[in-house]
Image (cartoon, rainbow, N blue to C red):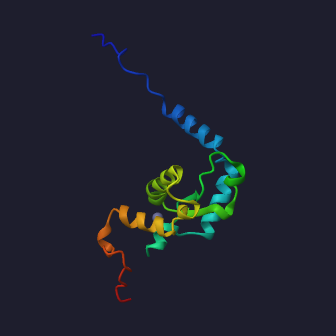
């Protein structure tokens, strides 16, 4: 029996999705040169700055542009404004920091993942907060 399939929207193939993603990333400057520079940066900064700021050791997976570069090449390549980040800090904490920055409620200094603003946000958003002192004090060292 004939089954009409016209109601289904055509889906882009995974190849097309890949090309689209790759194209936009390239437009934003993430090319082979960036990959090499980011790899080198990660070697020198293997731990997430935001996690380290609250006493956690998490591998760096993303080199984050502290100030959103929005295609600005000078800002993009300013290594003094790069920071090591884990996926979670990049996708959750930094996203919220940048939204506040865009609204003008925080400044450039607050965009660093070890700034007091970022640390407070990290503690607030942390998925497993039980390990942290709720009063915001130092995490107790468990007698090494
Ligand atoms: Zn982190």
Residue 138's spot in the image, x, y percent? 38, 80
Give the quarter of the image for residue 2.
Answer: top left
* Quarter of the picture holding the N terminus: top left
**Can residue 89 be seen in the rendering of this structure?**
yes
- Which one is in front, 117 or 87? 117
* Quarter of the picture holding the C terminus: bottom left
- Which one is in front, 108 or 69? 108
Residue at figure coordinates x 57%, y 64% from the top left: 109
Residue 102's spot in the image, x, y percent? 53, 50
Residue at figure coordinates x 51%, y 59% from the top left: 106
| 132 over 65 or under it: above or below | below
| 14 over 106 or under it: above or below | above
Residue at figure coordinates x 30%, y 13% from the top left: 3
Residue at figure coordinates x 33%, y 62% from the top left: 127
| 82 over 72 or under it: above or below | below
Give the quarter of the image for residue 88.
Answer: bottom left
- Which one is in front, 139 or 29? 139
Residue placed furthest toward the top: 2
Residue placed furthest toward the bottom: 143
**Can residue 58 be seen in the rendering of this structure?**
no
Residue placed furthest toward the left: 1
- Which one is in front, 100 or 79? 100
Is 132 situated left or right of 93 in this image? left
């Amino acid at each position: 029996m004939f089954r009409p399939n016209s109601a289904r929207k055509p889906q882009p193939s995974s190849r097309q999705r890949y090309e689209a993603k790759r194209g936009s990333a390239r437009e934003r400057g993430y090319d082979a040169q960036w990959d090499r520079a980011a790899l080198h940066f990660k070697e020198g900064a293997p731990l997430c700055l935001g996690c380290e700021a609250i006493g956690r050791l998490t591998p760096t997976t993303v080199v984050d542009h502290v100030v959103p570069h929005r295609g600005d090449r000078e800002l993009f390549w300013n290594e003094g404004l790069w920071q090591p980040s884990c996926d979670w800090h990049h996708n959750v904490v930094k996203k919220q920091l940048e939204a506040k920055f865009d609204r003008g409620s925080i400044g450039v200094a607050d965009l660093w993942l070890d700034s007091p603003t970022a640390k407070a946000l990290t503690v607030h958003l942390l998925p497993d907060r039980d390990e942290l002192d709720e009063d915001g004090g130092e995490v107790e060292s468990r007698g090494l």
